[in-house]
Image (cartoon, rainbow, N blue to C red):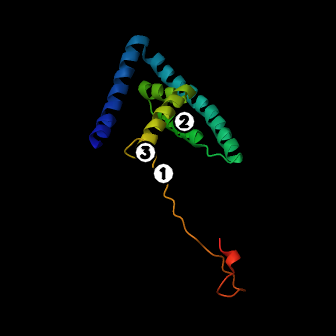
Amino acid sequence: MGWLVLLGLIALPVIEIALFIKSAEAIGVLATVVVAVLAGIGGIALLQRQGLSTIWRAREMMARGETPVAEVFDGLCLGLAGLLLVLPGFLTDAVALLLLLPPVRALLWRWLGGRLTNASADGGGRRASPTVIETEYRVVRPDQDEQPDRDERR
């Protein structure tokens, strides 16, 4: 796994440089720089708008007593998109813009959610049932004798 991360860290800048060179050959150097800057500015504006929307949805869910798991996932995707937008390059901008699209995040959420559910399941593919421990107890009050009445047993 470590080798894949190292390979990705080496390959990403090489791919970005190659894309810049091809783009500069096709549309010119100035146009390439302008497109890269505009993509970053547009992505950051979209990120800000969607980030605020996600925060408001999460707050509303928490006010209703619900856990905003999907909203937290959206927030993580938006944070990753913001990081990718800061990095210069067309490939990182393209991945960031994909993460900014709600349908793409929804697909990623469904795919990842299915994998997480399967990982937490037992060998048969079903969730393990909780362990139930049955017991008896009695209420002990300091103002009473050591032996409570039979009615106080529960």
Which image quadrant is residue 149 in? Answer: bottom right
Answer whether residue 85 is visible to the viewer in this image.
no
Residue 100 picture location, percent across and down: 54, 29
Residue 152 picture location, percent across and down: 69, 75
Residue plotted at (63% across, 37% down): 54
Amino acid at the residue labelled 2:
Leu
Outermost residue toward the left in this view:
3
**For the residue carrying disc 1, how many other residues have a C-alpha within 10 Å: few (<14), some (14-19), or many (20+)?**
few
Outermost residue toward the bottom in this view:
145
The residue tagged with tag 1: helix, strand or loop?
A: loop
Going from the N terminus, do you reach mark 3 or mark 1 first? 3
**For the residue carrying disc 3, how many other residues have a C-alpha within 10 Å: few (<14), some (14-19), or many (20+)?**
few
The residue tagged with tag 3: helix, strand or loop?
A: loop
Residue 76 picture location, percent across and down: 52, 40
Q: Is residue 60 left or right of residue 95?
A: right
Q: In this view, does 14 lie to the left or right of 69?
A: left
Q: Is residue 21 left or right of residue 30?
A: left
**Residues tagged 3 and 1 counted as in contact (Cβ below 8 A):** no
Amino acid at the residue labelled 1:
Ser
Outermost residue toward the front in this view:
150
Q: In this view, does 90 lie to the left or right of 57?
A: left
Q: Name the residue under label 2.
A: 78
Q: Which mark is residue 129?
A: 1
**Closer to us: mark 1 or mark 2?**
1
Q: Residue 121 carries which label?
A: 3
Q: Which of 15 and 30 is in front in this view?
A: 15
Which image quadrant is residue 42 in? Answer: top right
Give the CA distance from mark 3 to mark 1: 10 Å
Task: Identify the image quadrant of the C terminus.
Answer: bottom right
Residue plotted at (62% across, 46% down): 67
